[in-house]
Image (spheres, helix red, strand yellow):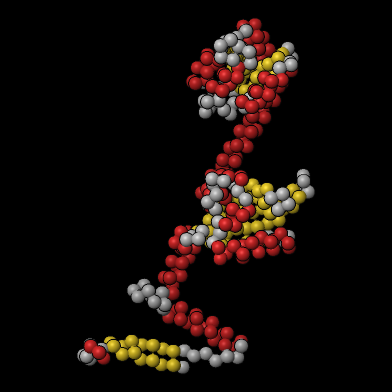
Amino acid sequence: MREARPTVLVIDDDFTMRLLFRESLEPAGFNVIEAESGAIAIDYCRHQRPDIILLDVIMPGMDGFATCIELFKLPHITSIPLIMVTGLDDIDSIRQANELGATDFITKPINWPILKHRLHFILKANRAFASLRKNEEQLNNAQRIAQLGSWEWYPASGRGAYSPECLRIFGLGHLGQEATAMAFLNAIAPDKRAVVSEQFLRAWREQQALTVETELGEDIESQRYVRVHIEVSLNPERQESYLSGVVQDITEIKRVEEKIRRLAYYDALTGLPNRRLFREHLQFALNHAARYQQVIGVMFLDLVCSPSATADSQYRLHVACT
């Protein structure tokens, strides 16, 4: 199956230049759409989406820069490669085009045999970037659904890189990539910060992977639980070691575990500990006493109700010790 011919939108007030672009690009496999002004190009792009745009800087009325600004206001155009066509020595135009978000620039006089190869290369690079953006979006969606974030931290430089879900879990989405190690530490429950810090230092010191579970937030009612996996990695380009890993919000898992525990160890009617919990605690105490040659005592309390007795003596407490 043959690939569709990419569409090039040529924006130039000079008819001769538009003709030269058409004669050069159509034999190379491009569809060429002409626009003699910025206004015509903007109107076309409101309804169509070209694959690449060639935009002359110098035009009467709306020049190339103003046209570029208006084109990038259209959401479906922002990801399209836009090439500014400018004079050979017009350094200011090249700088301004770069600041406006242009992908590349072509200087006049144009090398026509090279132009087609350059556009094919730019389109290929843009497809690679689009694929990368799509993969990144899919990864972010997968992390959001799994409540799983990823992170990197370079102790030597203090730099870090965090996925959106990692920032959301810690409540630092407003800081973005500017979030610091101290900001992450302060998000942890105060009584857990020292333990978590020690685990990170241990992973770095011993160059080994570790996993730590902790709570986030100071308010007990709204606290969340996270599991953080820590690894030490090496950046081969900079020969710099760094910490990396994942963080998972396990709040719901903890809540389910607590519900299961209460169902297993507490009476559903009274909410008091049941025999299973008593036996487990008793067995633990017996094992501890045997290990350290100690003696333990068990006290049995029984509250007995006698309906026939007077109000003062209706309830009696029976106590037995062993």
Residue 265 is left or right of residue 132, and the answer is left
Q: Nearer the viewer, residue 24 or 200?
A: 200
Residue appearing at x 46%, y 81% in the figure: 278
Tally of numbered discs? 0
Q: Is residue 174 left or right of residue 92?
A: left
Up/down of 137 relative to 15, above or below: below
Observer-nearest of 84 and 29: 84
Q: Is residue 189 above or below residue 175?
A: below
Residue at 63%, 13% (x, y): give it.
Answer: 58
Residue 110 shows up from this direction: no
Asked where in the image residue 98 lies, by quadrant, the reply is top right
Residue 105 lies, in percent from the top left, at 68, 21
Q: Which quarter shows the N terminus?
A: top right
The foreground one among 188 and 52 is 188
- Percent position of residue 202, x then y: 69, 63
Q: Please identify the residue farthest to the right as the structure is shown.
A: 239
Does residue 156 appear left or right of residue 197 in this picture?
right
Q: Can the viewer see residue 278?
A: yes
Residue located at (60% from left, 17% from top): 64
Q: In the image, residue 130 lies at what x, y percent?
A: 61, 33
x, y percent for residue 73: 52, 25
Quarter-of-image position of residue 38: top right
Vertically, is 32 above or below 154?
Answer: above
What residue do we see at 65% from left, 23% from top?
A: 96
